Image: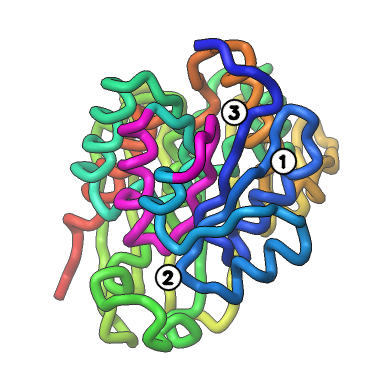
Amino acid sequence: MTYELPLRAALIGCGGRGRAHLDTLYTSVDVDFVAVCDPDAALISLVHDKYGIRSGYDTVEALLEKETIDLAIVAAPAHLNARVALPLLDRGINTILEKPPGLSSEETRSLKASADRTGARCIVGWNRRFHPLLVNAREMIEARGPVVQISAEFHKSMSRLDTGRWPDRVMDNMLLETPIHALDMCRAIAGSEVRKVYSVERRSIARFVDIHAALIVFENGCVAQFSANYTTDARLERYEIHGNGISAYLEGVKEGVVVSDGDSIKLHGADSGGGTREQNQYFVECIKNDLPVQLPAADLNEAIKTMELAERVREGLID
C-alpha cells in the first residue's frame, strides 16, 4: 500500500515512555502527529503544551471515530498493550507497539492474526535490537565467526514498583515488563530457534516472582545465560557476547568494549536513547517504501517467539 507523506500519526499513551517515542519522530518530515490519546487529561495537556498536537482523546474508540491515521504508537501499561493495539491492527493501521505485546503468546498471536488479515505492519518495541552498542558488538564478533555464548542480565527493584500502580497479575509477571528486553536479546543475538530451556523462578523476598534464571540452548549450538531479579535496589542491565577469540562486554547499554587479539576497543553509540530512534525511523522507512518489517526488527512473528521463550522460562517457577 502506498501512503501520502507525511504519514498521519497518533500517540496512544502519553506517559514518559510514549513521549520518548514521540521525541524520536516528532521532527520527522515524513510524520505528522495529528492526535494523542490517554485517559489522563493532564498527560494530554502536557503533550499538547509541549508539542502542539491539536487533538486529544480519552479512548482509542473515540480517536478512531474522528481521525484517519496511517501510523500509531502504542505505549500503554503492560497489561493493556494488546487490548489497545488490536482495534488499530483490525483497521489496518501500522503500529509501533511497546513491549510486551500482551501478557501471553496467545494474545500476541491474536495481534498477528489481525495484522495478517488487514495487512497492517507492526513492530514491537524491543529496541535493544537497534541499539548501536549491541549492533556494533554483534557485527564485530560475527565477522570472526558465530556467536557461541551470551550472558544477559536485567535487574530492578520490586519494592519501588509495588505501589499499587500495577495489578497483581502484572506484578507477578514483571519478567515481561522490563527484563524481557534481555531475554529478547538472547534470541536476537543467537539468531536461531530455541532447543532447550532450563530455568528457575522464585518468590524469594517479595510476594511476587522476583528471581529469574535460565540456561537457553539454541539449535545452532549457541548457549545463553539469562538472569533477572527484582530484589535489588537499583536498575542494572548487562550483556556479554562471546565468539571466536573475541568478546564484547556491555554495561547498562551505556558503555561497552570489545576484546580481541590483546586489544580492547571502546564501542560508540551510547547516547542513542536505547535504540528507539533507530527502530522507529526504520519502521517509518518500511511504511514509506512498502517494505515488510524484517530482522533485526521484532515483527509479530518474532514477538510470538520471544513470548513463547518467556513462557518456557516461567515453567521453572518454584512456589
Between disc 2 and disc 1, the foreground one is: 1
> Which label's residue is closer to the chain start, 3 or 1?
1
Separation of residues labelled 3 and 2 (CA atoms)? 32 Å
> Badge 2 is on which residue?
229
Which one is nearer the viewer's eye here, 64 or 148?
Answer: 64
Q: Which of the 4 quarters of the picture holds residue 203? A: bottom left
Which residue is depicted at the point 32% across and 41% down? 87
Q: Where residue 1 sits: x, y (%)?
A: 49, 11
Which residue is depicted at the point 74% across and 44% down? 26
Amino acid type of the residue that numbered disc 2 sits on in the rendered structure: Asn
**Residue 281 in magenta?**
no
Amino acid type of the residue that numbered disc 3 sits on in the rendered structure: Phe
Total labels drawn: 3
Which residue is depicted at the point 42% across and 44% down? 64
**Residue 175 visible in the picture:** yes
Decide: few, some or many residues near mark 3? Use Cα within 10 Å; few <14, some 14-19, many ≥20: many
When the figure is inspected, residue 274 is found, relative to residue 244, above or below; the finding is below
Separation of residues labelled 3 and 1 (CA atoms)? 11 Å
When the figure is inspected, residue 145 is found, relative to residue 46, above or below; the finding is above
| Quarter containing the C terminus | bottom left
Q: Which mark is residue 283?
A: 3
**Residue 68 in magenta?**
yes
Q: Which residues are magenta?
A: 66-91
Is 46 positioned to the left or the right of 319 in the image?
Answer: right
Secondary structure of the residue carrying tag 1 is helix
Decide: few, some or many residues near mark 1? Use Cα within 10 Å; few <14, some 14-19, many ≥20: some
Is 6 positioned to the left or the right of 175 in the image?
Answer: right
Q: Which mark is residue 25?
A: 1
Decide: few, some or many residues near mark 2? Use Cα within 10 Å; few <14, some 14-19, many ≥20: many
Secondary structure of the residue carrying tag 2 is strand
